[in-house]
Amino acid sequence: MTATRDLLALDGLCVDFTTAHGTQRVVHEVSLAVAAGECLAVVGESGSGKSQTFLACLGLLASNGCAVGSARFAGDELIGADSEALNRIRGTRVTTVFQDPMNALTPHMTVGSQLVEVLTAHGLAGERDARRRALDALRRVGLDDPDGRIRQYPHELSGGQRQRAVIAMALMAEPALLIADEPTTALDVASQAQVLALLGGLRAQGLAIVLITHDLGTMAGLADRIAVMYGGRVVEEGPAAQLLAAPAHPYTEALVRSVPRADAAFGQPLATIEGQPPRPGESLSGCAFEPRCAVRIARCRADRPELRASGFEATAACHLVAPP
Amino acid sequence: MSTPLLELRGVSVDYRRPGFQRARARRYRALDDVSFGLADGSALGVVGESGSGKSTLARAVLRLVRPSTGRILWRGEQFDSAPRSRLAAIRRELQVVFQDPFGSLDPRMTAAQSVYEALEALEGVRDAAGAHRRVDAALEAVGLDPGLGRRYPHELSGGQCQRVAIARATIVGPRLLICDEVTSALDVSVQAQIINLLLHLRARSGMALMFISHNLTVVRVLCERVIELRAGRIVRQGGTQ
Amino acid sequence: MSDALLRALGASHGGDDLWSAAWRRLRGNRAAILAAALLAGVVVAAVLGPSVSPNDMESVDWSLSPLASPPSLANGHWFGTDANGRDLFVRVWAGTRVSLLVALLASVVSLVIGVAWGATAGYLGGRVDEWMMRLVDILYALPYMFFVIVLTVVFGRSLWLIFVAIGAVGWLTMARIVRGEALALRNRGFVDAAIALGLPAHRIIARHIVPNLLGTVAVYATLTVPQLILFESFLSFLGLGVQEPLTSLGRLVAEGALAMERAPWQLLFPCTVLASILLTLNFLGDGLRDALDPRLT
């Protein structure tokens, strides 16, 4: 099913964690693909396993985590690869941006030296060349006064500026794929818009992006395809415009409805999804969304629906989805 | 017009930045000459980018930080000069919920214990059994099963923790609830639940609300009026519709 | 990064507080459990040892020639005898009792003072913190040996003096560590929430600051005890420690050092016991630190 042109291809990926309470599976049989130059948005609530899926691909799981299945980057298998092979890919061909920029930036090093370090540590460029490219990267992400920023420390920048610096760091080695995990969640609305516009511009220049988020509202216009995760599984996947306009899975539909609209009226309760998502690792028979589903039928509790075609190049895991 | 519940007149708050510069250079004005009034039962939104002074405003009202100039009045009475006993009464009427759901609960106390402490501190407890019943009722009022009260914050989700914080703040029935970015750390789907909860609580008790957020859409749903802060100053005041 | 997920994974259905989670982690730490077992063994021996042996601390066994005789199972002197013909087995365990008791009691005192001092200074901050910690710095700078010697000269040698001297040493480090943690805790949201509830400072310190410090305190308390045992041993070694008829591990080591060449057993046994106590306490302290660290899952 995965085309050979896919840059990143996940096939039946599972992630297990071993805790004092036994082994729990938090990601079940995820199969996704990202083509070169494409933006895939992975949407889900906290605990849906969306972050763990991609941490597993990069070998960044916590020590008690274990990935099973396949994740190929440009044909090379990532799961189970040794750290040398992973280090060649991480930071150079696949880079990451996380939610809190202060977790990526070392407080006691200047912004410039951290950008330069990306190239010099991988042996990709000499000091002087790296500095020139650092200035370029800062310009590319739209930070004003690059020469000044190079010498500043992370705490001297605002939240939005720091996130841009982190994105600049991620671009230093000219990666093919950028994995952004909730990059705008910690920012205020104005900075959010700026960072999203920046990502959109980068995608237009040919960078493939995986955008992990809990907020459907932020990635409209940026994503080419959307994958919705719930309870550790992909429950719907398809072209962005199609999915947002006519969601096939009840969860997706509820998510779309619960995005606060710009024309919201004072005192009008927002559309919500009653109840709580399942706890990670909770094993359930039947559909994970069934307790909260507005259109559930008897079959949903006992019988877990598999992903089936729900439209053009789209799939959804719901018994009520009629094949086109 | 009747006396506003809460009023600020020309309030400024200066912070001192740590460092070896001269005293004047170290001073950083977080709030600059802020004046507004909040009527009983009304809802006021406070918006602005990060660093605009929104949180400092909340902290000043709660007396977590001292204003350098200006006056803060509660029911027409100045805060600073209020005697001890009056302060306790004001606290019963003025409560707060903060942004970080996990950070605002003591990790060593169960949810129920945190809510109980509020009851103890603000009203005093003479009848322990009755107090426990009130704690259970408060948890139910925010949409939580009372059984969850036995859990510690790290065993609850962000949304659940925030509900506990709201229960703690509203158990004594305050007249004004200050919400400082209470939904910013939550998933969008959970945000909607908390917003609806606040709407419900306001409708039920007529409680006033000061809702601080950087999200204008959410503010519009909860509040009739809004003030916008930038670099510590009010740059816009008005209705939200 | 994956905090929320790992938190949710680790949680059971209510009542899983940090102490039971820490206890579970500690149980899984082999080195710490072994250390705890060995330490328990030493304590049991110290309590029961003297009653098990046919001899007692004071009486001289005139039947031996020379008086200082090596360990033998035959004559009932399982650790041998010292230069005065007194049974070493009983003396070692009696000395262990004294060393442990003094160190434990002094630890408790220094813990209480250190935690109260440090938590108050850290929480109140500002000038109060400055002056309180300045006092700690001054006391730190005092040369302790001179201090103890002067006290001995003025007040004569007594067990209480040892307590005071040792206790005065122990609380300083604890105060510094606790103050650092309290400073960090002060900025946490739940402290703001407690202030907003109108709780007075002493209640916030007692109810919210100190309980959240207990992890660190427990670790450093286990590491303070060996420090104090060593200090007491050092004092005894110098002749400033406990007086006859009491003895302590330090005194025994001092006496044994003098007879090292002719009667090595006199040094060997007290040293081994002392080293075991110090080692096991350090391992236990390390294990506690790992178990109580909330960042490790």
Image (tube, coloured by chain):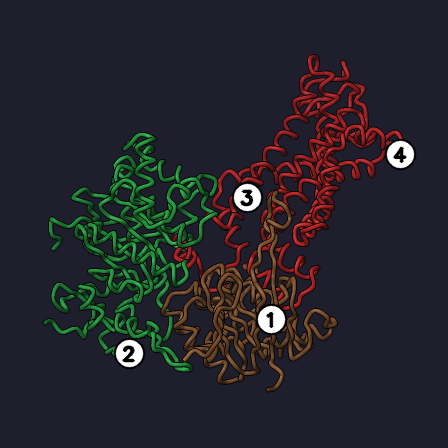
- Give the labeled residue for mark 4: C155
Q: Residues within 10 Å of mark 1 (few under 14, many from 20)?
A: many
Whether label 3 touches label 2, CB < 8 Å: no
- Give the labeled residue for mark 2: A294
| 3D distance between C-alphas at marks 3 and 4 | 40 Å
Q: Amino acid at mark 4?
A: Phe
Q: Is tag 3's residue or tag 4's residue first in the polypeptide sequence?
A: 4
Identify the element where label 3 is drawn: helix
Which chain's colour is green? A
Q: Amino acid at mark 1?
A: Tyr
| 3D distance between C-alphas at marks 4 and 2 | 84 Å
Q: Residue furthest bottom?
A: B1
Which chain's colour is red? C
Report the disc number at residue C289: 3
In this rendered view, identify the residue nearer to me: A59 or B192: B192
Identify the element where label 1 is drawn: helix
Q: Colour of chain B?
A: brown
Q: How many numbered marks does the figure carry?
A: 4
- At a point 25% along the width and 51% down the height, the residue shown is A202
Please tell me in which quadrant of the rendered image residue A246 appears: bottom left
Q: Residues within 10 Å of mark 4 (few under 14, many from 20)?
A: few
Callout 3: residue from which chain?
C
Report the disc number at residue B116: 1
